[in-house]
Image (tube, rainbow, N blue to C red):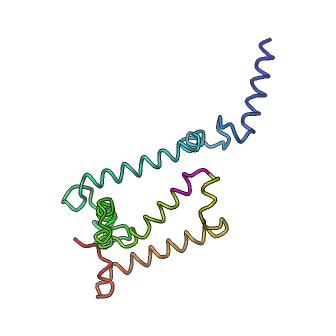
Amino acid sequence: MFRDVVEAYVSYYHGAMASPHIHSGNPTGRTGLAGLLSERPDWFAKAVTTAGAASVCTAVALRDPREEGSFAVCPWLFLTGTQCPGCGILRSLNRMVGGDIEGALGYNVMWVIAVPIMIYSWVRWVLPAKFANFLPTIRPDRRLAAVLVFAGILVVFGVLRNLPWEPFTWLHPTK
């Protein structure tokens, strides 16, 4: 009798692992944190990402990064004396959350351009597939190229914003 119960459980368990509709166990074979997260349903990652983004926006809205000592000092700026492509993101986000897009542009132009793209990508990811398929996307065979182009743009932006000459000084974050 016990053997029949075990065999029934094993056959059910293996059937559940093969079914795309039931997510149990660790089908990826990953260990550690990656294995733990792969066991979670899809909505869990979406909920954690949404909560994290909302928490960051709330923290930046409640604590003005323009005030001295409100957030940690940028390690890149501290060590090199130059501004990385991310310098001014917290101040820009603070202005964006407050609705001041023009002020946000003064802190980090690339961030103001990237935020709508990130919001669009998040909406496309969070929506069920039957709704998200109506939104345009980058073809899978061109995603790596898009990431490399964006990385190249960030490197060029990081170099140009540190040049002291007039056409490039408007890329410096305002104080």
Mostly what secondary structure, the magenta segment?
Answer: helix
- Residue sitting nearer the eye, 131 or 167: 131
Q: Which residue is found at the position 29% from the left and 76% from the top?
A: 172
What residue span does the magenta drawing correspond to?
Answer: 123-128
44 shown above or below 117: above
Q: Position of residue 5 (x, y in %)?
A: 77, 17
Judge whether residue 49 is colored magenta. Answer: no
Q: Quadrant of residue 24?
A: top right
* Left or right of residue 39: residue 74: left
Q: Position of residue 98 (x, y in %)?
A: 29, 60
Q: Which residue is found at the position 45% from the left and 65% from the top?
A: 116
Q: Quadrant of residue 159?
A: bottom left
Task: Farthest residue to the top: give it.
Answer: 1
* Left or right of residue 81: residue 21: right
Q: Which residue is found at the position 39% from the left and 68% from the top?
A: 111
* Left or right of residue 6: residue 105: left
Counting the numbered discs, the total is 0
- Residue sitting nearer the eye, 24 or 80: 24
